[in-house]
Amino acid sequence: MEAFYRTFLVFVVGYLFLRFTGKKAVAQMHTFDLLYILILTNIISTPVEVNNLVKAITYAAITVILYKIFIRLSLHNKLRWIIYESPTVLIQNGDIDREGLKKVRMPLNELLSHLRVKGYTDIQSIAMAVMEETGNLSIIPKSEYRPVQPNDLNLQVKKEFIPIPLIMDGQIIYHNLKYLQIDRGWLINEVENKGELVENITLATLLEDGKLFIDNNEEKEHNSNPYYYKPGRDN
C-alpha cells in the first residue's frame, strides 16, 4: 500500500509541476528545456526507490522555480541569445549552405529527406530553409512556387468557421453548449431526429449553418469502391 501511495504521489506532483511550468517545456523543447525535463524526472522519481519523499519534492520545486526564472530571463533579447541557440540557415535562394549543414551536423541526404516530408523535391524552388532553435526545419518557398493565395487574385473570402464539437466519444461537451448558449434539450432533440443515440456518436459538431453533423460508430459498406480503399488487410 505504501508503494502505491508513494508512486501515486510522485506521479501527481510531477504532473502538477509540469502544468505549473507551462506548455512550452513539454512541446517543442530547446536544449535548456530538455535538460530541465531530464533533471526534474530524475528528482521526482527518486522517492519511488528510496525513502526521501519530502526532500525530493523540495528539490523538484527548486528546479521548477529556477527554470521559471531562466524562462523569464530569456524574454530579454540579449540574454535569449546566450540561453538558446541561434537559427541556422541551410538553404538560401536555392543554394545549399554547406557551413550551415556542418554546424547542425546534418548530412545532405537527411536534408533532402526533410524537404520531401515538407513536400519539396527541388531545392531551386526554396527561398530559405532554416533549422530553428527547437530543431524543427522551417521552409519558405520562392514567391513563384508558393501556393496561390486568394489575395493574389483579389478575391474576397469569408471568415473561416471552425466546427464546434458538441459530442465526442458518446459524451456531451457541456462547456461548448454553455459557450454557445445552447440548451441540452435542443441537442438531444437534434440527435433523436437523426435517428441516433448520444452514446453511439463518435463526433457531433455544430456547423456554420447551425446544423448538426454526426459521425457515428458505424462504418458504411462501399462495395469495393476504389475511392474507399484501406491499406492493409482490413478491406
Image: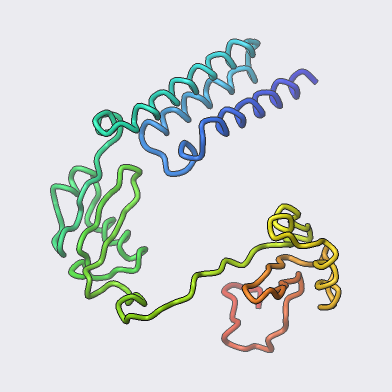
- Give me the residue at 69% from left, 25% from top: 7
Which residue is pictured at 59% across the width and 81% down the height? Answer: 229
Residue 213, quarter of the rendered image: bottom right
Q: Is residue 90 left or right of residue 18?
A: left
Quarter of the image with the C terminus is bottom right
Residue located at (53% from left, 15% from top): 59
- Residue 133 quadrant: top left
Position of 55 relative to 96 (above/below): above
Query: Residue 161: x percent and y percent?
Result: 55, 69
Vertical side of 110 occupied by 58: above or below: above
Q: Looking at the picture, does residue 132 appear above or below residue 72?
A: below
The answer to which quarter of the image holds residue 17 is top right
Residue 222, x across and y down, in percent: 68, 86
Q: Is residue 66 left or right of residue 196?
A: left
Location of residue 98 with respect to 54 vertically, above or below = below
Judge from the rendering whether residue 155 lies leftward or rightward of residue 201; answer left or right: left
Q: Quadrant of the N terminus?
A: top right
Residue 118 appears at what percent x and percent y? Answer: 35, 64
Residue 208 point in image, percent of width and height: 62, 73
Colour option used: rainbow
